[in-house]
Image (spheres, rainbow, N blue to C red):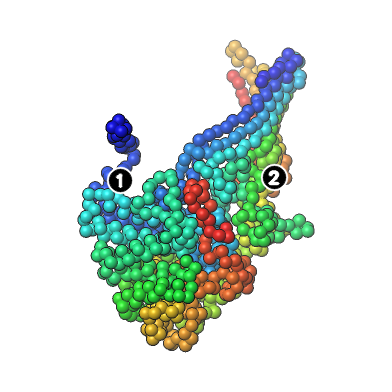
Amino acid sequence: MAAALLTATSCIRDLDIQPVDDDVVLPADILTGVEQYEQVLAKCYIGLAVSGSAGENSGDIDGIDNGFGQYIRALFYMQELTTDAAHCVWDDKTVRFLHYMKWTRSDVFVRAMFSRGYYQISMCNELIRQAEASQFKDNEKIQQYIAEAKALRLLSYLHIVDMFGYEHVPFATEETSVGSVGPAPNPELIDWMEDQIDELLQSNRLADIRHAEYGRVDKGFVQMIKAKLNLNAPVYLNLSGAEAAPYYTKAAEACKAIVAAYPALHPNYQELFMADNDRCTDEIIFGVQAKAGETQTWGATQFLIRSSYEEGDAETGNRLGMNSGGWGGVVVTPTFLQKFDRTKDARFIFDGGPNNYPDTMDDPGSFKTAWTAHKFTNMASTGNIYEGATFVETDFPIFRAADAYLMLAECQLRGASNVTESEAKAAWNAVRTRAGLGNVTSYTLDELLDERGRELYWECYRRSDLIRFGKYTGNAYLWTWKGEEYNGTSVADYLKLFPIPDAEFNTNSLLGQNPGY
Amino acid sequence: MDLGFWNDRLTANLDVYYRKTTDLLNKTPIPAGANLRNELVANIGTLENKGVELDLTYIALQKQDLFWQIGFNVAYNKNMVTKLTAYDSAEYKGVATGGISGAVGNTIQRFMVGEPVQTFYVYQQVYDVQGHPIAGLFVDRNGDGKVNEDDMYCYKKPAPDFTFGFSTNFNWKNWTLAASAHANLGNYVYNNNLSQFSYMGDLWTNNFTANRISNVLQDPFYNSDNLYFSDYFIENASFFKLDNVTLGYTIPKLFRLADRNASLNLFLTVQNVVTLTRYTGVDPEVFGGIDSNIYPRPRNYVMGLKFNF
């Protein structure tokens, strides 16, 4: 026994080796002070904004064009292109298949989203892991950074669970070992997320709601994650009736906290999506920042704005605060346009460009047969155009108070015990009033889904909403080119979840595949 | 193996080889959640090459004032990727390679286990009774009732099965006639020009008519779904090329210098004489097998005088 112990001790230091290569930099050499941790935290934030740290053509993930692999763009491809609100006409790989709803296990865009989500999760894990093991771990700022990283990690887990399900995806935290062995799934992933949410809301390490500097997360951000997770949890966990009700009550609790902290919406809808929308702190709870000089990317709002006008269309370019180099890519289905009162609704920001293209979407491979959205613009509310007009200044709002207003009404309609009908209607009507419409006349879930579409289109919630309202798969709701038919056709239910990318199965034998793939 | 016959009038060299290359670098996926990237370069790939090479040199005539030599070689090669990742799951569709022009990020080739290097990875085009492609219609190869990425297949490869080389040299008195030629068999090319300029929806672009390729007169594409990935654009680019013909005449005693004769050599050379192929692009010889070249290879006529003092 003594001999065994001795042997064991004698080799411990031998394994404690450091690389001698000058080009290899170890975390211990960099993380020498609190400020350095702030820079790692900055990487956790910027991971949502750009594709890589070295400019618009760099990328943190492989196997995908850098622009495609940017977080918000990948999210948009999954959440909007697969719905009535958007379609991309390009010939890029399988991009049209997203709208046709015929993606497969090997789809590059699906994999881009998966890899992006886990890149964020791993980056946050790394900060938490390093910070908790460091000599500064009791420093107040470090504690705050850890809390912020945990909140950002929750956002990416929310996206992963929403798109890939909770049962078969890898579960990685700061305790997961780094290396060649992939982590196993966690059947209690959703419970773990609920626990993380509670921990952050109770902790005093995270800024209170509306108390963080703009662009950083606070408890309002965590409340929004709580609302979204609980509102969708009955879908994720396949619950209904009495089993689902407590989740709606929890979601309503979070929505009420938001409504209380954001008692009035920003008066002007369009301003929320303009170049100076960082001023809209009265409604934007968390925005992914864009700075033309610092956060250059082919994803995020840069993609949303450029894709909404054609190459050479200087007229629209000018109107959007851009040069004439449009990409002419993303269009909107006629089915979706029909949901608007075109004359009254301030949110009807669609057109067919200077050539007055029809809105019929006859050719799914052409930008010339459909309308597109100009809700996102690089023009400032003051009429100023930002320098260069090559890269944009417009932030992408991840969470807005108006979303919480509508979720509150939805919770009530779904049977939350802690919201009255008058509270719910008041919240819904506030959203309608801002849009220039009268009070809601048809207080139903179907009408609410349409309202969410009108209010939140292109903000990466459409797919989740359609699923929650039972309108995504099957034939309960058809839109132009759904299922690759002009008038739309029924698609199979398994498409509610995206597949775990096939590349993952070459490296992690613990994963399972979502049914149907 | 080296052989000589008839007093080395015919010499032959025969090589048969099998080469297995291991530890090739592949950008391989790594487990999500355990790293800060999704792919890493690892020494993990394995590739097999098999082939036969035969060289023949034949001296057909060797007399005073008359010499004729013929050289001929043929090589056969077959390669196959045999390993790419740590666990080669059947679901893994390999590494995308071979970027093409048109749209963003599109690739037409793969490195895939069990397939030749850079095999084309495409959809199988459906044709009408007249043999014209039906735009947007592809074969549901796995028979699941829908055409999606699962119906893509490996079709042909850019490397030739056989390569041939031929050279000859004929001398009669002061005249020389030399020629060289080469040929490839079984090499395929993705005609990127055809795929890029066949879609009629782009005819009217930026308020101008854009150039289309003349092929649209017989096979216009009015639907661009998966257009770039149709096997229609993969063409057999086997060819025979007569590269070089030179006719020369030497005047050995042009005039007398102090201790020797000055000579003059007159010659006429034609380069890139003729290409025989069924490939429809400008040049069937495309390194890597993706043709987006729009400039034809020039035919050069060279006339020369060479003085030797």
Q: Chain of mark 2?
A: B
Cα distance in 3D space between marks 2 and 1: 54 Å
Q: Position of residue A335 (x, y in %)?
A: 56, 76
Q: What residue is pinned by disc 2?
A: B236
Q: Secondary structure at mark 2?
A: strand
Instruction: Name the outermost residue toward the right.
Output: B129
Badge 2 density bin: few <14, some 14–19, many ≥20, Cα 10 Å: many
Rendered residue at 29%/60% (across/down): A147
Q: Tell me the residue at 64%/45% (across/down).
A: B189
Between disc 2 and disc 1, the foreground one is 1
Q: Amino acid at mark 1?
A: Pro
Q: Nearer the viewer, residue A434 or B6?
A: A434
Report which quarter residue A158 is drawn in: bottom left
Q: Amino acid at mark 2?
A: Asn
- Residue A147 in view: yes
Which residue appears at 55% of the width and 44% of the height?
A: B88
Dot 1 alpha-carbon crowd within 10 angstroms: few under 14, some 14 to 19, many 20 or more = few
Q: Secondary structure at mark 1?
A: helix
